[in-house]
Image (cartoon, helix red, strand yellow):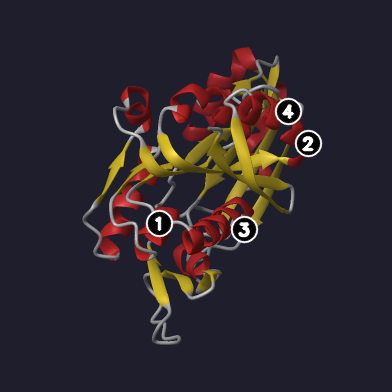
Amino acid sequence: MSNYYELYIYGVKETEEDLVSSLLFDLGASGVSQKLDFIQTAENFDPRILNKAETDLLAYFDTPITLESFIVLKNLCTRYELKEELQKDWIAEWKSHYHPLEIVPGYWVVPEWIEFNKVTKDKQIRISPGLAFGTGTHPTTQMMAEMIHQVLQNETHSDFLDLGAGTGILSILMYLKGITQGVATEIDEMAREKCVENLDLNQIKSISVKDEKFLLDLKHRYSLVVANIIDGVLINLRESIAQSFAKTLIVSGILEERNEFFKNEFIVKMNLKIQSSHQKDIWWGYVLKANS
């Protein structure tokens, strides 16, 4: 398997970015990407791209090249460098990092390509995770799974709403633990497709997958609502979330540095009672009830 080459171009003026990109393609680049700088506001973490006078570009080449080939670029950037990288079977490399994960006692997240035999009574959440997300290893996902597990040891629920469902791991967990009716909502289209695929892998037909608009026109209160979403978005959605649950609300995605702010802006303003609080790494989560 042949190597490939990465050409880093630094300090390209914004007005000359299109010209440099065109030159790179003329010189045989198979792709060109731009480094984007952005900030996230303190209130809702929505990213905002920063406009800068200069930018950095990265070009990819499949065939051997030398820096001398790019002398034409010298007047259009402050510096450039070339790196040779080893070509790999990236899919095989990606798969090799995933192993069965016991997300809560007796429940395992298992990638679809792995034949896995554990204790007979243990249950499996079979997943096709996607290249970038949805493996169950993120601290907030694990914390959500633990909170769901604890709640369902003491409570019975008729249905659920999973907000920010990702690839559906928590929805499948709730189904396996006995809540067979539910809705999984997700803003990302690729994640929704994976969620549908994972539900099919687990032969689940009674959970529907919806986009984010579903919450805006909700006519039904779900017995259990779970939301693994960054705290700023939870705060933005608090009015809709308040109308979505009948019995129990479980949330995570709250950064430790914003925990007190979240409690004031979400829990206090929604008049919720904290049944239990949880922390994993830099993240917080809560099991909440409506105050009577």
Label located before the other in sequence (3 or 2): 3
The three-letter amino acid code for the residue at tag 2 is Glu
Viewer-nearest of labels 4 and 1?
A: 1
Task: State the residue position of label 1.
Answer: 156
**Residue 179 location in percent, x, y?**
34, 57
The three-letter amino acid code for the residue at tag 1 is Thr
Q: Is there any visible trace of residue 190 in the rendered image?
A: no
Task: State the residue position of label 3.
Answer: 85
On the picture, is 245 further left or further right than 137? left
Task: State the residue position of label 4.
Answer: 261
Label located before the other in sequence (3 or 1): 3
Secondary structure type for disc 1: loop
Label located before the other in sequence (4 or 1): 1
The three-letter amino acid code for the residue at tag 4 is Phe
Label located before the other in sequence (3 or 4): 3
Viewer-nearest of labels 2 and 1?
A: 1
On the picture, is 200 further left or further right than 1? left
Viewer-nearest of labels 3 and 4?
A: 4
